[in-house]
Image (cartoon, rainbow, N blue to C red):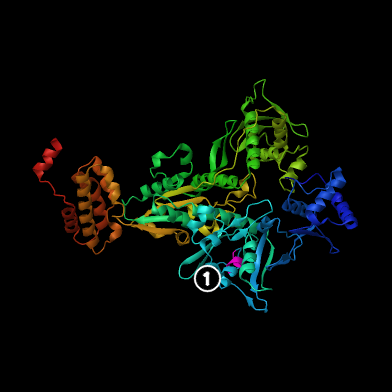
Amino acid sequence: MAIPKIKKQDILDALKYIDENGVPFHNQSTKYELVTEDGKKYPPKYVIAVADHIANGTDISVEGFNAVEAKTYLQGQGFDIQIKQEKYELTITADAITSTDERFTMDNLFLGDGYKPLDAYFKRANGEIIKRSYSKGERRNSNQTMPRIACQIFEKQISALSVEEKENFPICKYNPEGDLVCGIYSSVEEFKKHRNTIEYFTYGYDNGRQFVIYCWNIFSTIIFVQECLKRFGDASDQFVLTYREKEEKESEAEAEAAVQEELVQQFKGYRNPYSSVLIESKNIIFRGAPGTGKSYLAKEIATDIISNGYFDDYTMLTDEQRKQVEFVQFHPSYDYTDFVEGLRPRVNADGSMGFELQDGVFKKFVARARKNYEDSQKSKEEIQKEVSAQQMIEDYLENLDLDLDSSNAASLKTVNGHSFFITGYDEKHIDVYIPDNETVKRLSVSRENIQKMIESGRKFSKVKEVTEFFGKKFGTQGYSYELPICHAIQAKKHRKPVAGAGSVELKKYIFIIDEINRGEMSKIFGELFFAIDPGYRGRAGEVSTQYSNLHDNPDEKFYIPENVYIIGTMNDIDRSVDSFDFAMRRRFRFIELRADDHLEMLASLDDDELEAEAIRRMSALNKEIASVAELNENYQIGASYFLKLKTLSFDQLWTDYLQPLLQDYIQGMYDEKGIMDKFAKAYGYKKPDDGDVNEAIQD
């Protein structure tokens, strides 16, 4: 979608035309108004449509661009655009449904997606007004408030209905051709047997009983409310709903909330109980004694979630599924450039050294998740356009001769007639060589920009048009070269576009940070402290990164989408835990793993007697460790140490692993030798005499 080719004078002429001819009802403004100095108000989209008619002789049509594009363009031309503020009142009686908004119609209740409730109440025939008695934690003035009031007032009558009457109770019919949604159910499980969706609300009554009813937008329960009045109300009883149009940001936030609800609803059926904890909390940290299997558990949870509870063995994930998991380990030298982004050295085509901005491991991972999240919100048509444009670009680049010395090297020309050559490309950029430019002979242009130009279907002829297309006041040097590359790609004959590109499934992405407390958190995360907060996922938490001025688009913001989950692991006894940033602490849910929490991992020893003996020795040793005054349960030994018994004896496990660790624990304490002897006795280690040692060495 894009604004047609018009000038400011065309817009001024359009305003005169509208003054003379008026605005058709169906073209009235819904969100914005162009306000002139003399106070006159005009609908922005219709102004653009009339200006296009005047300038280009087209039919007056608001198709092909949206309200935001019209608003942005007119503001860029210096016109004052204001948000249209107006409240509407919907009145429901047993016999009629009316609204002060003339656009309202019962033939299209989908319009409710664009409105936000401000107030709702029930008015009796005698003038008494009843409002919602909100339950603890219930949202005020939501799409569910009006039907909840109906349930509140007619609770006894609804509960007295038979099961058959409840299941056939009319709820919603979006348009005359659509199906009538029916049913008042006793639980979410019963509701989902008839309609497997998250579009419902629950009303609790009578000590744990429920009404579960379909509900989505502000208008979707109008029929239910009117039916309640018909069956149970008195003459002249009415429900009144006050509402307004949503702002664009409110619509985006609601869409993100719906995605989050969908993700949360999917967690049922996972194999691991911690999987649902992660989905609900977004960020968790497993803390506890060494060897409790925290890192192993993190990968198990990631596998469980990504396979939708099918298996929890990480090795069973496909290569494609493994792209949904990333594993890093923090250490004192780890920093922002490793994690988010930073300048890295590179060898230029001419052999000289330079620096380029490269994404760190977390930013690359988030980019994959973000693409999936954004693609999942697109229609099939949008996906098809994107795939086709990508294929066209790839077709063109694959057949280029990138050798400048070759006679087949493709020469392109800018609009001003300057020659240049394509010398290389990657996923993000196309490298060009400009022989006649004395200042900058080599440049990397944006592959994404070219793709967007192709997807638009427009035929750009001037750099100025490209600048306007991207919503910029001033063009960049890159636009001069992106335009002819776009022309060259569009002019080339391509393979038949990929068929069957359909909707994209919303996936979950798990980022695991092992030993999270060993890194300097403020140095690694920087401004991402805000973005990783579970309450600020999505565009609500977008930030400018430290190197944003070096991005292709300096205005680009970084955010972490709803489908990203973070697992951290940390040993409580690690000395670096003291420096763990408190601002980061409150953004994670901390879960303690005790030494004996995951004894089941010892089943992999494949020897019942060995497993039983390992558990006996571990339990005895940990009991002795906890009895030392200066130590506690955080110093106990986890089961993963005993997995080494696959290749070691109990004595070798003690001398080579456990004894050195325990000596570090008690270093500087009174009677170190006595404490170590107690540990050895509890474990079952008996120090060999000299003869035994010599025989062991000979063996």
| Residue 33, visible in the rendered structure | yes
User: Which residue is pictured at 52% across the width and 70% down the height?
Assistant: 135
* Residue beneath disc 1: 135
145 part of magenta stretch: yes
Compared to residue 152, the image places residue 292 above or below, namely above
Compared across the picture, whether 305 is left or right of 494 comes to left
Q: Residues within 10 Å of mark 1 (few under 14, many from 20)?
A: few
- On screen, residue 678 versus residue 327, left or right, reads left
Above or below, 610 against 670 in this view is above
Location of residue 566 in the rendering, given as x and y in whole percent from the top left corner: 46, 52
Where residue 491 appears, as percent x and y from the top left, is 72, 29
Give the quadrant of residue 234: bottom right
The magenta stretch is 144-148
* Dominant secondary structure of the residues highlighted in magenta in the image: helix
Disc 1 on helix, strand or loop? loop
Judging depth in this view, the residue of 455 and 379 nearest the camera is 379
Q: Position of residue 542 (x, y in %)?
A: 59, 54
The vertical placement of 644 against 289, above or below, is: above
Residue 652 belongs to magenta span = no
Q: Quadrant of the C terminus?
A: top left
Q: Is residue 78 visible?
A: no
Counting labels gives 1
The picture places residue 291, in percent across and down from the top left corner, at 31, 50
Lateral position of residue 378 relative to residue 583, left or right: right
Q: Is residue 180 left or right of residue 629?
A: right
The residue under the point 51% across, 45% down is 365
Q: Split into 4 quadrants, where in the image is the N terminus?
A: top right
Give the amino acid at mark 1: Ser
Farthest residue to the left: give it: 691
